[in-house]
Image: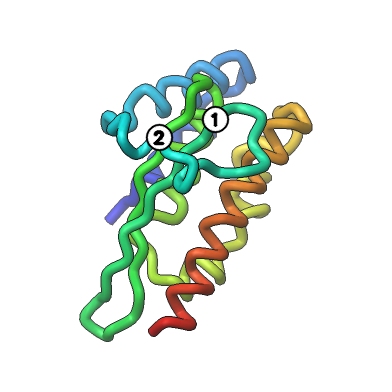
């Protein structure tokens, strides 16, 4: 069974030109479900991003009782909105342990993002990942 992340990685492999890859990232962001205005709150805002980024988590449990975290997110910038979509494909619906065990750098390196993002966008991406990892640590401690 392929995951949304598998689809994204496969599509990146077919796109040789970085202009096409940027367009694809923007398209991913446009495919995010509508984000309620009420959730664009200070509590949901990700600090460390130049653009406005919001993440909302829902923590549930799987059959083994482990915390599973689902995310919704959005940004006010098109490229960053696409980065949010990639981060959600990478983490949303995973257990807290899976989130903490994910080699984010390997995934972003495979896509080639590390070499093609401005330092500000790289910092914002790092802030999103850190927020999600903090959520996972908190969910595990509460479990």
Number of the label disc, if any, that sits on residue 52:
1
Q: Can residue 62 be seen in this view?
A: yes
Relative placement, left or right, of 10 versus 46 is left
Q: Is residue 8 visible?
A: no
- Mark 2 and 1 residues: CB-CB less than 8 Å, in contact? yes
Q: Residue at point 37% right, 55% down?
A: 57
- Give the mark nearer the N terminus: 2 vs 1: 2
Q: Regarding mark 2 in the picture, which secondary structure is present there?
A: loop
The one of 105 and 13 positioned closer to us in this rendering? 105
The one of 79 and 135 positioned closer to us in this rendering? 135
Q: Residue at point 68% right, 32% down?
A: 121
Q: Where is residue 122 in the image (x, y as percent from the top left)?
A: 70, 37
Q: Quadrant of the C terminus?
A: bottom left
Q: Where is residue 22 in the image (x, y as percent from the top left)?
A: 56, 20
The one of 3 and 86 positioned closer to us in this rendering? 86
Task: Look at the picture and state if 67 lies above or below 37.
Answer: below
Q: How crowded is mark 1: few (under 14 residues within 10 Å), some or many (20 or more)?
A: some
Q: Quadrant of the N terminus?
A: bottom left
Task: Look at the picture and state if 128 lies above or below 139.
Answer: above
Number of the label disc, if any, that sits on residue 40:
2
Cα separation between marks 2 and 1: 9 Å
Q: Residues within 10 Å of mark 2 (few under 14, many from 20)?
A: some
Relative placement, left or right, of 33 versus 43 is left
Relative placement, left or right, of 119 versus 137 is right
Q: Where is residue 109 in the image (x, y as percent from the top left)?
A: 67, 45
């Amino acid at each position: 069974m392929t995951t949304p992340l598998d689809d994204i990685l496969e599509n990146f492999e077919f796109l040789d030109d970085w202009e096409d890859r940027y367009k694809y990232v923007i398209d991913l962001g446009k495919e995010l479900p509508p984000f309620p205005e009420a959730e664009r709150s200070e509590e949901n805002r990700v600090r460390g991003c130049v653009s406005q980024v919001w993440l909302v988590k829902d923590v549930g449990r799987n059959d083994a009782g482990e915390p599973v975290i689902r995310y919704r997110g959005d940004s006010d910038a098109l490229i960053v909105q696409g980065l949010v979509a990639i981060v959600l494909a990478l983490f949303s619906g995973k257990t807290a342990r899976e989130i903490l065990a994910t080699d984010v750098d390997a995934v972003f390196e495979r896509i080639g993002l590390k070499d093609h993002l401005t330092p500000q966008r790289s910092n914002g991406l790092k802030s999103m990942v850190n927020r999600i990892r903090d959520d996972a640590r908190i969910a595990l401690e509460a479990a």
